Amino acid sequence: MTNNNDINNSSETSEVSENKIKNPPTKYDSPWKDILQIYFKEFMEFFFPVAHDQIDWTKEIEFLDKELEEVAKDAAIGRRFADKLVKVHLKNGREEWVLIHIEVQSQEEEDFAMRMYIYNYRIYDKYKKSVASLAILGDDKESWRPSSFGYSLFGCSLNFEFPIIKLVDYQQRLAELENDGNPFATVVMAHLAALNTKEDRSERKVQKLALVRRLYEKGLEEQEVINLLAFVDWMLTLPPDIEAEFKLEVKQLEAGRRMKYVTSFERSGIEIGRQEEALSLVTRLLNRRLGNIDEATLERVRSLSTEELERLAEKLLDFTSVTDLTNWLSGG
């Protein structure tokens, strides 16, 4: 006899899958990580101009992402990685080099300030170098602005403060962004468009097309256009039917132009490869950790996005039974 709960669960799973197709989740983290690495100098100039002017840009900068993962991997503070750790040299010559730790946070998190402090301290403890922790807050909650962590006990006190950039503050500066040649003007416009169109993918298509048109009309170098188009494409996800309309309108826009909008296809191939790799890793870990898993549960795992698979790969190390897995898949 078929269990009613099974029918309900199956129906709910089907509805969730259908909603993901109609409204594919916006992937805030991946595009930011990529664009930060490509345009780090421009990032500092746009958001932190005072700090930018103190950095010696004639000397090589170094991204220490793997080192950061090593520093933070055993920290029981939710996420197991920060976004970027960058080694730079200063103009004043007092220190040979310093570190900039950057977090891009796209959702409210209760312990975010504490996490910023823990990462900052762990980085300092490892390198014994000054560390500047900077936060970009990309959520849509106007009042959430964490910028400090501290406590006081028996005369001992701690006060850790860090600068933040709240992207929704740029909602009132769109005309200024429109005329700004810094790549991060486009980045902020795309991020705000993603926030503003979460519930209206038809409007998202309109705004995405406007950003593409703007890039074509700016007279930028071809590689810079491609870099920023990739960010726009990652950020402003569309359901298949509207994506098809978008691509057709872009082709019409490209008529008579030399550059082509190929980033959707390039990104799709990269994303498929990344998802297959994540699924293979999770499947191997599940088999070693939990043993045989029923086909229905495996099918639910296969339906996860790349980001969900990567989160599961971290979380399943704490699982002791298949029930832990099914609870996680159900959001429990």
Image (spheres, helix red, strand yellow):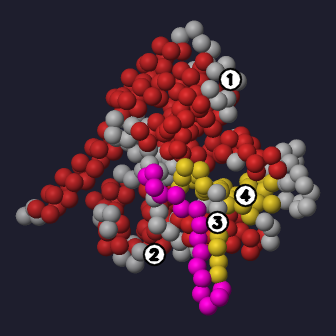
Indicate the amino acid at tag 4: Ile
Q: Distance between the residues labelled 2 and 3?
A: 33 Å
Q: How crowded is mark 3: few (under 14 residues within 10 Å), some or many (20 or more)?
A: some
Indicate the amino acid at tag 1: Leu
**Residue 288: percent from left, percent from top:** 46, 72
- Sequence order check, earlier mark of 4 and 2: 4
**Residue under circle 3?**
161
**Residue under circle 4?**
100
- Sequence order check, earlier mark of 1 and 3: 3
Q: Distance between the residues labelled 1 and 3?
A: 38 Å
**Residue under circle 1?**
220
Quick one: SS at disc 3?
strand
* Mark closer to the observer (4, 2): 4
Q: Residue at x 65, y 70 (%)?
A: 160
Indicate the amino acid at tag 3: Glu
Quadrant in which residue 18 is drawn: top left
**Residue under circle 2?**
318
Q: How far apart are marks 4 and 2 (CA)?
A: 31 Å
Indicate the amino acid at tag 2: Asp
Q: Contact, CB < 8 Å: mark 2 with mark 3?
A: no
Quick one: SS at disc 4?
strand
* Mark closer to the observer (1, 3): 3
Is 237 a magenta residue?
no
* Mark closer to the observer (2, 1): 1
Q: Give the range drawn in magenta.
A: 141-156
In the picture, which quadrant includes the N terminus? bottom left
Q: Residue at x 10, y 62 (%)?
A: 4
Q: How far apart are marks 4 and 1 (CA)?
A: 29 Å
- Sequence order check, earlier mark of 2 and 3: 3
Q: How crowded is mark 4: few (under 14 residues within 10 Å), some or many (20 or more)?
A: some
In the picture, which quadrant includes the C terminus? bottom left
